[in-house]
Amino acid sequence: MKKGLVVLIISMFSMAVQAQEKWNLKQCVDYAISNNISVKQADVQARFDKLTHHQSTLALYPRISSQHSTGFQFGRSIDPTSNQFTTNQILFANHGLDLGLDLFNWFSKKNTIKANEYLAQASVARLEKAKNDVALNVANAYLAALLNKEQINISKVQVAQSREQVDLISKQVDAGALPELNLAETQTQYATDSSNLITAQTNYILSLLQLKALLNLEADAPFDIEVPPVASIPVEPLSALDPAVVYQSALENLPQQKINNLNLKASEKNVAIAKAGLYPSLSFFGGLNSRYSNAQKKIASSFQTIDMPVGSVHINGISYPVISPVNQPAGYDRNTYFRQLNNNFSQNAGIGLSIPIFNGGMARINWQKAKLDVENQQLLKEQDTRTLKQDIYQAHTNAVAAIEKYNATRIAVESAQKAYDFARKRFDVGLLQPIDLILNQNNLFRAKINMVSAQYDYVFKMKLLEFYKGLGLKL
C-alpha cells in the first residue's frame, strides 16, 4: 500500500511538471522586471520626479492668470462703474488679466532646475537598482530551485537502488539464503529514501512558489523552470574577478553609486537655493482690468448747450439774471456690456522689490539645514562605498571558499562511489551484510547532495561577483 502511494505521488508530480511551460532565467528576470511591484513603484517615482523637473523649467516663464467674477449687490452700496452710492440692486461683473515675472532672484530658479534634474536622474538610477535587485533575487531563487530539482534526481536514483535491493534480498530471503532481518533493514532504507524523495519534491514546489512570488505570479498559476546542466553555466574565471578590479568597476557601474553622486549634487544645489532666500528679489508685474454694472443702462450719445439761470445781481435797485451755458444730454444710447468693458478698461505695469527682513529666522535656518544635508549625503556616500567594498571582498572570499568546498565534495563523491562499488561487488557475492551496503549507499547519497549543493553555491557566488563587476546575470 505504501509503495503504491509513493509511486502514485511521484507519477502525479512528474505528469504535472511535464504539462507546464518551462521558464528559463532570462524569461523569469524579464517577467519580474515588468511585473514586480517594487520595480513599478520605482518607475512611478521616476516619472514623478521627471514631471517635477519639467515643472521647474516652466517656472522660468511669466506667470499669467485670468480672474472673472459676477454677482449681485443689495442695499446701500457703491456702483462699481460710477463709484456713486446707490440703493438699487446691481448686477456686476469684473474681469482681469495679471502677469508676473521674476527678473532676478539670485539664480534660485536656475539652481532649482539643476537640483530637480539631478533628482530625476537619481530616480532613473533608483529604478535601475530596483531592476538589478529583483534580477539578483530571481537568480538566487532560480538557482535554489535548480538545486532542489537536482536533489530530486539524486533521490530518484537512490529510491531505484533501494527498490532493487529490496527485490534482490526478498528473493534471497524466500530461498532461505538470508534472514528476514536483512529484508526488514532494506525495506526501512527504501521507505527512508522514498520519504527523502517526497521531501525533495516538496522543497522544489516551495522554491517555485517563492520564485512565483518574486515574479508576481499567482500561487496557483502553472509554472516550472528549465534545468540547464550546472556544468554548462558560464562562469568567469576567478582570476578575472579580482576584488580590487571588481570594486573599481562597481563604483562606475552600480546604480547605488550613481544615486549617491546625484543626490549629493542635488543637495549642493539646494544650498544655493536656500541661500538665495536671504537676499532681495526683483520682479515685474502687469495687469489688465475692466468691469460692468447694470446700474448704468443708458449713456449720453449727444449734447446740447442751454442757458441756465444760476442767480441774479442787483444794480441800482434793479435785478439782473445771471445766465451760464450748460451742456445737457440730447440723446441716449444703450450702455451695453461690451461698451462698458471698453470704457472701463484699465492697465497697470510696474516693478516690485521684495526684501527679506525678518521671518522668524526661517530663511537662514533653511540655508543651514541645506548645508547639513550636504554633509549627510557625503556621509551616506562614504558609508555605501565602504559597504560596497566590504561586500565585494567578502563575496570574493566566499567564492574562493566555495570553489575549494566544491572541489573537496567532488573528491568525496569519487571516494564514496568507489566505496559503494566495492561494497556492491562484495554484497553480490555474499561477502557483505545488507546493512553495510546500506551504509555505503547513504554515504554516497549524502556526498552527491553535498557536491550538488556546493556546486550551486559556487556558481551563485561567482555570479554575484560578476554582477558587481557589471557583467549581468547569465545562466
Image (tube, helix red, strand yellow):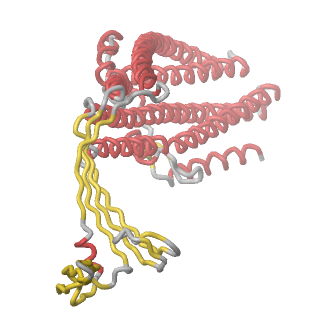
In the rendered image, the residue lying farthest to the bottom is: 331
For residue 124, side relative to residue 167 (left or right)? left
Q: Residue at left 25%, top 83%?
A: 318
Q: Position of residue 212 (x, y in %)?
A: 53, 44
Location of residue 395 by image quarter = top left
Q: Position of residue 287 (x, y in %)?
A: 26, 56
In the rendered image, the residue lying farthest to the front is: 316
* 279, 193: nearer the viewer: 279
Q: Position of residue 474 (x, y in %)?
A: 35, 32
How many numbered circles does the render carry?
Answer: 0
Location of residue 385 by image quarter = top left
- Kindly tell me whether residue 388 is visible in this rendering: no
For residue 57, side relative to residue 71 (left or right)? left
Is 444 drawn above or below residue 128 in the view shown?
A: above
* 374, 424: nearer the viewer: 374
For residue 408, side relative to residue 167 (left or right)? left
Q: Position of residue 445 (x, y in %)?
A: 60, 23
Is 225 drawn above or below residue 306 in the view shown?
A: above
Location of residue 237 by image quarter = top left
In the rendered image, the residue lying farthest to the right is: 180
* 435, 79: nearer the viewer: 79
Is 223 drawn above or below residue 335 in the view shown?
A: above
**Quadrant of image for the C terminus:** top left
